[in-house]
Amino acid sequence: MKKYLFVLLFVSFTSIGLSQDLIYGVRGALNVSNLDYKPDAQFENQHRNGFAFAGFVDFEFNEKIGLRTELQWSAEGGKAQELRADYLHLPILLNLPVSERFSFLVGPQFSLKTWKDKDAFSTFAFSGVVGVEFMITDEFFIDARAAYGVLNILDEDLTSFEAKNHVLQFGFGMKL
């Protein structure tokens, strides 16, 4: 079932992309991330500073709406070594321009962990993302995003805690 859903999404985005204006680009960001625990953690839970790197495609439907799909690697989790989590993200964001230079981004983000030695973390994560983007020139932009996890990222069989990732990103990008 998951394979069929993936193929359907891929074909949909490809056919949309072939009929619309496409803009490709790259983006780098500074992450400030942490984990929210339920019940509250009985230890000092410090944030982690990390980086994110991405390539993206913008589908411009018209002047009032667009869609950005992105493939992003991101260093997240908590500061302690055992709480660090690196992910491969696939955000699918609506691009809602407010003016020629300023726009809002909003949408879901699907994630897979990219390490093997931390079995306490589940393989799949899902988040909601909101952000703002400001075009410095026609090619270069800065942005800020907030992502908040919807699913528990800890393996339920190994721990009684529930944790959700939350991340602030401050990025710089270039449209090619």
Image (tube, grey):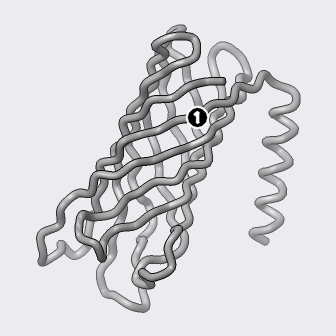
Counting from the top left corner in percent of width and height, residue 4 is at: 83, 65
Identify whether 30 is placed above or below 103: below
* Rendered location of residue 11, percent (x, y): 86, 48
Crowdedness near tag 1: few (<14), some (14–19) or many (≥20) residues, C-alpha within 10 Å: some
The number of numbered discs placed on residues in the rendered structure image is: 1
The answer to whether residue 141 is left or right of residue 78 is right
Residue at image point 53% right, 68% down:
114
The residue wearing badge 1 is 26
Q: Which amino acid lies under the numbered mark 1 shown in the image of this protein?
A: Val
* Point 43% across, 91% down: residue: 157
Q: Quadrant of residue 16?
A: top right
Q: Residue at x 51, y 45 (%)?
A: 53
In the image, residue 133 above or below residue 86: above
Tell me the residue at 73%/23% (across/down).
61
Q: As drawn, is 13 to the left or to the right of 153? A: right
Q: Nearer the viewer, residue 110 or 143?
A: 143
SS assignment at label 1: strand
Query: Against 66, is 170 above or below?
Result: below
Residue 91 in the image: state x and y as whole percent: 57, 47
- The quarter in which the N terminus is drawn is bottom right
The quarter of the image holding the C terminus is: top right
Residue 86, located in which quarter of the rendered image?
bottom left
Residue 134 placement (x, y as % from top left): 44, 19
Q: Is residue 138 left or right of residue 149?
A: right
**Nearer to me, 60 or 33:** 33
In the image, residue 9 sits, relative to residue 102, either above or below, namely below
Determine the residue located farthest toward the bottom in the rendered image: 157
